[in-house]
Structure formats: structure tokens, C-alpha cells
Image (cartoon, rainbow, N blue to C red):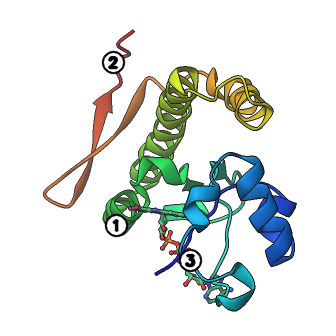
Amino acid sequence: MGLGLVGRSVQVKGTPADVEAAVRDAGAGWLLDEMPSLAAMRAGDSGIGSVQWSLGGHGIRIGDANLARDALSSQGIAVACSEALYAAAIRTPVDAALVHARQIEQRATHLDTLGRVIERCRFREASIWSDYASFVARFGDRPVPAETAALRQNQVQRMTVRTVT
Ligand SMILES: Cc1cc2nc3c(=O)[nH]c(=O)nc-3n(C[C@H](O)[C@H](O)[C@H](O)COP(=O)(O)OP(=O)(O)OC[C@H]3O[C@@H](n4cnc5c(N)ncnc54)[C@H](O)[C@@H]3O)c2cc1C
């Protein structure tokens, strides 16, 4: 049995007693009921679960190295595999530019969707979510490229982006 926690600083990186107190303060003490104390449990891996991305540099980045989607989307593995197929199909500089444009478009779409999810979130007024919403909104309104890439029979093809509002 494991316990997964999402939060900032002491909420996830404090001592076991700090983390337990943070869970109880958040009204989620029931999660700890009938569980061993956190001090008696083995700590697992931890990582950033919020959206992040990289820009510039050489070569083509795929998966989380390009855009680590918010973990809530549960899409990271599928899109990382898909991007690997796109990257392997690049044969010309035009292909590379189209795949790059697709990455920009995918990032804008993810930020837009994420912003809408947070807007509907029950806890959207809490600072942790409102701060996150501000961050997402700050980067979410970048222009989306007019053209992007589609992959057909292992060939990169040009596709026009249609924005639906
Ligand atoms: C809390 C959480 C929950 C998630 N839930 C889901 C989910 O339900 N469904 C889903 O699809 N996705 C989920 N994801 C996202 C998913 O895990 C990632 O999107 C996916 O693993 C990205 O794959 P990747 O190959 O790009 O990167 P990674 O899986 O991070 O693989 C990169 C690998 O490169 C290695 N590496 C790094 N630097 C070097 C180096 N210099 N030399 C050699 N090796 C190196 C790393 O050790 C790592 O093994 C979740 C993510 C988080 C954080």
C-alpha cells in the first residue's frame, strides 16, 4: 500500500511528522487512517507534477524533455511515444520545422486545457491553484502556428491548424 502526495515544500519534503500534519491540516487525515505512520514507510520517488517545458538549443526534444504535461492529464507516456515517431520521421528541414510547430501548438493546447480545468476546480481559490492558474495564463496565450505536422505512413505532412473557440 502506498500514499501519493502532491504539494509544495514542507507538504512533500518535510519530515514524516510535518507531512502527516500537512495532510491533516488539509482535511485529508482520513488518508492516514489504518496506515502505518509515514516514518515507518519507505519514501518513494518524487518529482515535479506541474507543467514545464524547454525552449531553444540544438536537436529535437521529445517527451518530457520537450513538454512535461501536468500529471493530471495522464497523457505523458502516449504523447512521448507519439513524438518519438514524429522525430524519427523527420527527413528534411521543412519536416523539422513542421514538427517544431506541432510542439508549439501542442504546448498552447495543453496550457489552454489546463487553464480551463483549473477554472472548474473546486479549490481554484486556494493560493496553490490560483498561483498555478496565473502561471498557466501567463504563457497560454501565445500565438499558435498556422501550420503543423501530421504523421501519415511514417511521413511528416503539412497540416493547417484550425482554432475552435
Ligand atoms: C506524478 C506523475 C504522474 C503521472 N501519471 C501519468 C499517467 O497516469 N499516465 C501517463 O501517460 N503519464 C503520466 N505521467 C507522465 C509520464 O511519467 C511522463 O510523461 C513520461 O514518463 C515521459 O517519458 P520520457 O521518456 O519523455 O521521460 P522519462 O520517463 O523521464 O525518461 C527519461 C529517462 O532519461 C534518463 N536520463 C535523464 N538524464 C539522463 C542522462 N544524462 N543520461 C542518461 N539517461 C538520462 C532518466 O533517468 C529517465 O529514465 C505522470 C508523471 C508524474 C510526475
Camera-near label (2 vs 1) is 1
Camera-near label (1 vs 3) is 3
Question: Does residue 102 appear left or right of residue 88 in this picture?
Answer: right
User: How many dots with numbers?
Assistant: 3
Which residue position is annotated with label 2? 162
Question: Does residue 145 appear left or right of residue 36 in this picture?
Answer: left
Q: Identify the mark nearer the N-term, 3 or 2.
A: 3
What residue is shown at x 82% (from left), y 70% (from top)?
13
> Which dot marks residue 35?
3
Instruction: Determine the residue located farthest toward the front in the rendered image.
Output: 34
* On screen, residue 83 above or below 42: above
What residue is shown at x 53% (from left), y 50% (from top)?
69
Q: Percent x, y for residue 20? A: 75, 66
Q: Amino acid at mark 2?
A: Arg
What residue is shown at x 78% (from left), y 66% (from top)?
19
What residue is shown at x 65% (from left), y 88% (from top)?
41
- Disc 3 from disc 2: Cα separation: 50 Å
Q: Amino acid at mark 3?
A: Met
Say which quarter of the image contains residue 153: bottom left
